[in-house]
Image (spheres, helix red, strand yellow):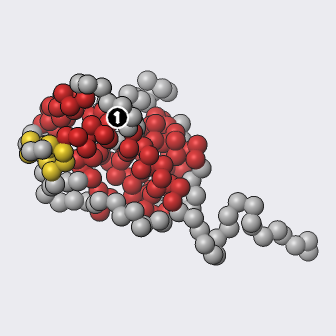
Amino acid sequence: MTRGVHTEPILPGRQAIVLHVLLRNANRVVGIDRLVDAVWAAEPPATARAQVRICVSALRANLGRIGLPSAIVAEPPGYLMRVTEVAPALEPMNPEDESPAHFGNLLRSHRQSLGTTQRLLAARSTVSVRAIRDLEHGRVVRPRRDTVRLIAAGLGLSGQARADFERAAAAYRPTTGTSAPGTHRKRRPV
């Protein structure tokens, strides 16, 4: 608890990653090997497949508590997350989209998939609510690398999900009509 704000993750890290991958691929089968790769970016342990099954079981229990008991179903070779209506922020990422709004949508989808508010994410990440809001609304052209890392940690992202998040933040590079650091116009003396 920090200053009266509960800062424990809504879902443990592995569950959050599995939920994220399933939501990003809503209504499509996601192989268990893909889930293992998302959770363990490097060398997965020998028990990785069993640990993913445990994560899915815990996710089902958590979803059941909020009225979605059969949202995740076993479908060879893995799992399928049933979603009746996919929100725009949860549609599959288009790697060609390099706008600040794209990163904002990705940030919002991660935050909402955890069921957390901007204020709670700010408390977890030590980034201001205003900065998170500006990022989500695409008002920030180039988020600072440290800010992105703090937010990723606050979201509990790791492995491939974290790499995708950081890549999306770095993807947008303004071409013309914007002022990159060090290229702004200097004021002329009057």
In the visual, does 77 lie left or right of 1? left
In percent of width and height, residue 98 lies at: 47, 65
Dot 1 corresponds to which residue?
40
Quarter of the view holding residue 41 = top left
In percent of width and height, residue 160 lies at: 38, 44
Q: Is 8 above or below relative to 73? A: above
Secondary element at image label 1: loop
Amino acid carrying label 1: it is Trp
Query: Residue drawn 14% across and 43% down?
Result: 78
Label 1: few (<14), some (14–19) or many (≥20) C-alpha neighbours in 10 Å: some
Quadrant for the C terminus, please: bottom right
Return the residue nearer the eye: 62 or 25.
25
Residue 76 visible in image: yes
In the visual, does 82 lie left or right of 23? left
Query: Residue drawn 17% across and 60% down?
Result: 85
In the visual, does 143 lie left or right of 26? right
In percent of width and height, residue 138 lies at: 49, 62
In the visual, does 137 lie left or right of 143? left
Return the residue nearer the eye: 120 or 154.
154
In percent of width and height, residue 81 lies at: 16, 48
Q: Is 14 above or below relative to 134? A: above
Residue 83 visible in image: no
